[in-house]
Amino acid sequence: MNSLYSILQLLAIFLVPLLIIRSANFKLTKLFGTIGTAYLAGIFVALVVFALRKLGADIVLNADIGEIGSHAAIGVGIPLLLFSANLKEARKLSKKVMIAFASLVVSALVVASLAFLAIGRTMENGAILAAMSIGVYTGGTPNLNAIANIFGLDATALGLANLSDMIVGALFYVFLLVAAKPLVSLVLKPARSASYMVAPSDMQNTEAIDLRKFRQSKRLGAVVLLAFAMTLVSAGAGILVWILTGAIPGRMTDFIVPAMMLGVTVLGIVGSFSKKIRETEGTNVVGHYLILVFSFALASSLDLTKVSTGFGMNILFFGVVTVGIFVVHILFSKLLGIDAECAIVTATAGIYGPAFIPAITKQLNNDALTVPGLICGSIGYAIGTFLGLLMGLLYGA
């Protein structure tokens, strides 16, 4: 019977994310985003399994399938997402936008550090959570998960951290859409025919997923294989380090996972500078699908019997960091002479990533900031993991 459950679990891990992408225009998916919907779907599965076990059913999901599947998916997905990030476009940003995004990054480092000192030191895995918050609020969810894997955070704690970030993020995003501009405009000057680019850009929203335009090709297959090879090479480097440090039994994964996360990030950035790789159509779709596979696999394998009162502290921590980053960023923007709309868009690029930029610029009625926001979001993806890793080491994670 357990083998049947494992087969069903494996099928769900790969089919549910596909259904989520296909339903990207549904109200629920639009509200929570595709990644948030994947987590909700996974948590629903975990709740059903938990309830059935409480009723006496002998149902146990295979933890190895969830863990191995999630690691493999994010390992290949990260370089595919980075491939489509046109980092060369950063040189076309105006000095004002670069300064504004730098303000956001510094704000994240300052606020996460203060939150760690004030709250995180008393929390289980507080140093890792602080490092993850830097990764996610300068880059995105893939950075958060990469940092957690580097520091060896267990699957249940990682799932709860993602859920906490999703809850806080959903609430704060409503604030950005509804109240951010009128409030920020009380502090910062309005945009007055500001120039945000020094040269025209062909940057596109690579996170806009439309399966109707997706086409398989030999070139796409080759790039996916390249990403897979990068994952294997990075994991192999971890095995080599494990061997060189004494090949201690039971500790191989402690070297493989961090090496894989760092390796695919570096190699993905390198690959993005190749025009042939970067302009291969469909890499963003496959990469996004694999991140959804990771998200669903992680959430569905949550052991809800291990969920403690620490969940509330997680929400508090991520809430304090999110609001704190925004407030400090606005204060820095005041000192630096950044206009209100530029400050809001660069904050969105860091805290949420490229996918949320078009909705914000539409709400602000300032399409001139769409491309700069997308570029800043791509920069965040590239640097978020390294910033989180550095600060995590400083925190003693």
Image: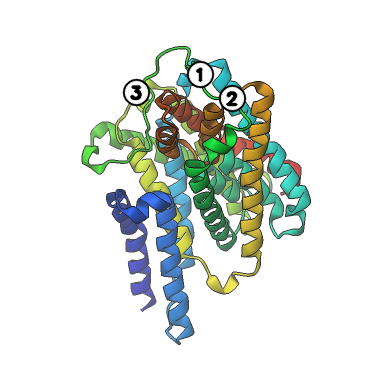
Check contact, mark 2 vs mark 1: CB within 8 A: yes
Q: Where does residue 259 sit, x and y in percent of width and height?
A: 57, 42
Q: CB atoms at circles 1 and 3 under 8 Å apart?
A: no
Q: Which residue is mark 2?
A: 189
N-terminal of the pair, mark 2 or mark 3, is 2
Judging by the rendered image, the residue that carries numbered circle 3 is: 276
Which residue in the protein does label 1 denote?
192
Q: Is residue 62 left or right of residue 187?
A: left
Q: How far, Cα to Cα, is label 1 from label 3?
A: 38 Å
Residue visible at 59% across and 50% down in the picture: 148
Give the residue type that dot 3 points to. Answer: Lys
Q: Residue at x 40, y 56 (%)?
A: 38
Give the x, y percent position of residue 232: 46, 42
Mark 3: secondary structure: helix
Q: Residue furthest top?
A: 199
Camera-side residue of 272 and 172: 172
Check disc 1 and give the amino acid type: Arg
Vertical arrangement, residue 193 with respect to residue 266, above or below: above
Q: From the image, state whether disc 1 or disc 3 is nearer to you.
A: 1
Looking at this view, name the residue that lies furthest to the bottom: 56
Tell me if mark 2 has few (under 14), some (14-19) or many (20+) residues whose alpha carbon lies within 10 angstroms of its own. Answer: some
Point out residue 21 in the picture as x, y percentages from the top left corner: 31, 49
Q: Position of residue 272 (x, y in %)?
A: 43, 27
At x 58%, y 53%, the residue is 253
- What secondary structure is marked by label 1? loop
